[in-house]
Amino acid sequence: MMDFLLQYFPEQAGLLSAEVDAIYIFMLAVSLFFTVLVVALSVIFSIQYRKRNEKMPEAIHGNLVLELTWTGIPLLLTLFMFAWGTAVYIKQVRIPENAKEIFVVGKQWMWKIQHGEGPREMNELHVPINQPIKLTMTSEDVIHSFYIPAMRMKQDTVPGRYSFMWFQATKPGKYHIFCAEYCGTKHSGMIGSLYAMEPADYQKWLDERIKNPLEPVANQPASSSSVESPVVHGEKLFTELKCITCHSQTSGAMGPDLAGLFGRDVKLEDGRTVPADETYLRHSIINPADGIVQGYSALMPTYKGQVSEEQLLSLVAYIKSLQSKKN
Amino acid sequence: MESKKNYLTNGHTVGSWLLTIDHKRIGILYLLSVTAFFMLGGFFALLLRLELLTPRGDLFTSDIYNRIFTMHGVAMVFFFMIPAIPAAIGNFVLPIMVGAKDLAFPRINLLSWYLYIIGAALAFVSIVMGGVDTGWTFYTPYSSTYSTSAVTSAALGVFIAGFSSILTGLNFIVTVHKMRAPGMTWFRLPLFVWAHYATSLIMILGTPVIAVTVLLVFLERAFGFGFFDPRLGGDPVLFQHLFWFYSHPAVYIMILPSMGVISELVAAFTKKRPFGYEFIAGSSLAIALLGFFVWGHHMFVSSQSMYAGIVFSIITFLVGVPSAVKIFNWLATFYKGSITFETPMIYVLGFFGLFMVGGLTGLFLAIMAIDVHVHDTYFVVAHFHYIMVGGTVMGYLGGLHYWWPKMSGKMYNEALGRIAAIGIFLGFNLTFFPQFIAGYLGMPRRYHIYAEEFQIFNILSTGGAMVLGLSFIIPIFNMLWSLKFGKDAPANPWNAKGLEWTIPSPPTTHNFETTPIVTEEAYAYAPHDKGGH
Ligand SMILES: [Cu+2]
Ligand SMILES: [Cu+2]
C-alpha cells in the first residue's frame, strides 16, 4: 500500500521534503473531504428534489447563520493552511549560517556550477549529504529556474541580480535538476543531475576534481577554468583588472576601502541608503555610475561587457572575504 | 410590416451584419469569432498532446513545439477565454436582462468587435510569420530581447484586443447604470448582470496595465528602450509584476461571468431564487476588487522578498474563500427545488465538480511551501485548466445551450447535448487529472522532451484530450444541426424567469415593443414570495 502511494511522490531526499509532503497530504485530505461533500450533496439533492409536479417550490431567501458557518469554517481552515505553509516556507528560505557555498550560473541552455573550493562542473552538481548547501545563482541571459524535485526546492535565476537557494540532501543518490522557467528553444534540455554523496565520497570526488579539472569552458578565458577557489580567483582578478589601484587599503586611495563593506549599509550621494549585498556589489562593478558612494566621485570605470558572470561571482566572493579577514 | 421581423431576418446583406449596431448581432459576430479561435487553440492543443505521447521529440522540433504551446495559450486566453462569455453571451443578453433596447453606446460596441478582429488578425499574422515562442506570458527579457520569433505582431495584437475589452466593460457599466427599465432596481438585477458589472470593473481597471506592459515589450524589442533587460539597464522582474497585476484579475474576467451564468442556470433549473442572492452579488464585487492584490502569488520563487510572499499568500487565501462559498450557495438553492436536468443543468453539475478541484488546488498553490515545489510544473497547468476549462468553458457551454433558443429561435437536440456535456466532463478529467500527479512528481511545464517516468501520465492525458476534442465538436454540430432541423423555440422554453424570456425567440431588433415595467425581483418563481426588495 505504502509503495503504491509512494510512486506518486518524488523521492524524499531532502531535509524539508517530508515536511512539504506532509502539508500536501493534509491538503489532499481536506480536498477529498470537500469534494466528496459537494458531490454527495449534489447527487442527493438532485435525486431528492427532482421535479415531481408542476408546483413551484417556495423561495428560501437565505440564512445568515448558515452563511456565516460555511464562510467561517473554510476561513479558519485556510488560515491554518497559511500558517503551516508559511512556517515551512520560512525554513525553505532562511539559509543556515554553516551552509557550504556553491555558485550557479544559468545560460541558454546549461548550468555552470562552481564549488567554493574551486572545481567547476557542468549540468552536474555533486554535494555531500547531511550538510546544508547554499547556491548563489545568477543568469547570463534570460530568466531560468533551478529546480530539484527531490529536494522540493526551486528558485529562479535572474540576469542582473543574485538569488539564493539552499537544501540539504539526506539520502545518497542521483536526482533530477530541471530548468523550470521557460527560456527558449532547449528549455526542456536544460537539465542535469544532482549527485548526493557520503561526505567521504564527496571529499574524494573533490580532490580528484582539483587534480584533474574539467576542460576549459569554451568562450571563457583560460584563467577561469583553473581550479582556484572563487576567492583566490577573485583576488587575482582584482589585481589584473586594476581594481587594486583605486581600492588599495592605503589612505588617499581614489575609491572606498572594500574591507568590511559586505553586509553594511552604504550611503549614496543621492541620499539613498542601500544594503551592500551580493547584488549591490555586482551592480557597483557593472554600473558604478548608478549609485555613487557618499564622499566619492564618479571615477570608477564601468566593467560592463569586460567581465563574465563567473568572474563577477569571483570578484564578489573576494570582496565578501575581505570582510571575514577583518573579523 | 417591419416590426414583425426578428433581428436575424431584419437585413440579409453582409453589410447589414458587418455594420450592425444591434447588440444581438454583434453578440453573434463575437460568438463566431471566439468559436473560430477556440477551434484554432484546440487544434494547437491536440498537436501538443500528440507530441507528448512519448518523452522524445517525435513530431516537431523544440522550436516548433514552443511556438505551438505559445499560440495555444495566446489564442485561448486573449481571443477566446476573455471575450467568450462577456462579449458573446453578455452582449446578447445583458441589455435584454436590464430591459433595454441596446447597450448604452451601440457604435462603440461595434468598434469593440473591430478592435478584437484587428488584434486577432495581428496575432494571426504572427502565426503566418512563423509563430511566437515566448509563452502566452511573454516573460522578459526572453520576449523583449532574446526571442527571434514574431513577438512584435503578437504583442501588438494583444495590445489592441485589450482595448476591445476596455470598451466592452465601459459599455456594460454605463448600460447597467443608465439603461435599466423602470422598476429594475439594483437588487432586482439578475446575478448574471452583477457578475458582468464586476467583470467590467476589472476590464476597465486592469486591461490598461497589460496593454501598456506589452507595449513596453514592443518598445524594448523595436527600439532598444531598456525597461526589462538588465543589459539595457532594465529590471526583468518588473515585467512579472506588471503582467500579473493584470493577469491575475484576468482570471476573474474569465471566471466571474461564468459564475454569473451558473447562477442563472441554477435558478432556472431548480425553479428557485438563488440562496443568498445578495451575498452572491456582493461577493462578485469583492472578488473583483481583492483580485488586484494577489498578483505576487505567481512570483514566490522569482526572488521576490520573503515578506512580500507572505502578504500575497494570505490575501490569496482570503480571496479564495468567497469564491469557494458560492458553491455552497448554489447547492443550497437545490434544496427543496423542483429540479430538471436539461443540457445546461448537466453543465452546471460538471462545473461544480471541476471548479471544486480547480479551487481546492488553488489553495495548494497559495501555500508557499508547496508552491516552491510545484510552481511552473504540470501541477499548475492542471490547476488553471480546471479553473479555466472546468470553470469558464463549462459555464460558457452551459450558457450557450441555455440561451441558444433565444439567439437562434431553434431548439438543439437534447440527447446530443447531454452526451456532449458528459463526454466533456469525463474527457476533461482524464486529460488533466494525471497532470496533477506528473506535476507533483516534478515534471516542469513547457517541456518538449521529458523524463521517461512521466510518460504514463502523458499517455493518459493524450487519451483524455482525444475524448475531450471529440466531445467539443458535438455542440458545434448540434447548434448547426438545430438551425436547419431544430424545432422552433417558444419564447420561454425553460419556463424560466427573466426579461429575456418574456420576448419572442428570436427577439425583434428592438427587443421590447414597449419598455417593460418591472414589478418583481429577478427570480420570482415562488407563488407566495413577495421578493426581498
Ligand atoms: Cu528554461
Ligand atoms: Cu493569480
Image (cartoon, coloured by chain):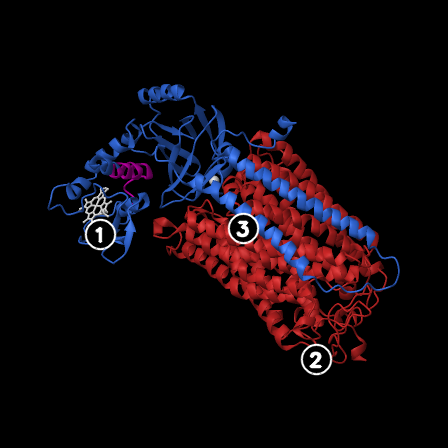
The residue lying furthest to the right in this view is: A53
Marks 3/2 same chain: yes
Percent position (x, y) of residue B372?
Answer: 49, 41
Residue B492: image quadrant is bottom right
Q: Do we see residue B105 in this rendering?
A: no
Crowding at label 3, few (<14), some or many (≥20) Cα neighbours within 10 Å? some
Q: Where's the N terminus of chain A, which quadrant?
A: top right
How many marks are shown on the rendered structure? 3
Residue B333: image quadrant is bottom right
Q: Chain of mark 1?
A: A
Q: Which residues are magenta?
A: A304-320
To which residue does mark 3 refer? B136
| Mark linked to residue A293 | 1
Q: Chain of mark 3?
A: B
Give me the chain that's red: B
Give the Cα separation between the discs numbered 3 and 2: 45 Å
| Mark linked to residue B182 | 2
Percent position (x, y) of residue A123?
Answer: 43, 30
Percent position (x, y) of residue B178?
Answer: 62, 77
| Mark linked to residue B274 | none
As shown in the figure, which amino acid type bears the numbered disc 3? Trp
Q: Where's the C terminus of chain A, which quadrant?
A: top left
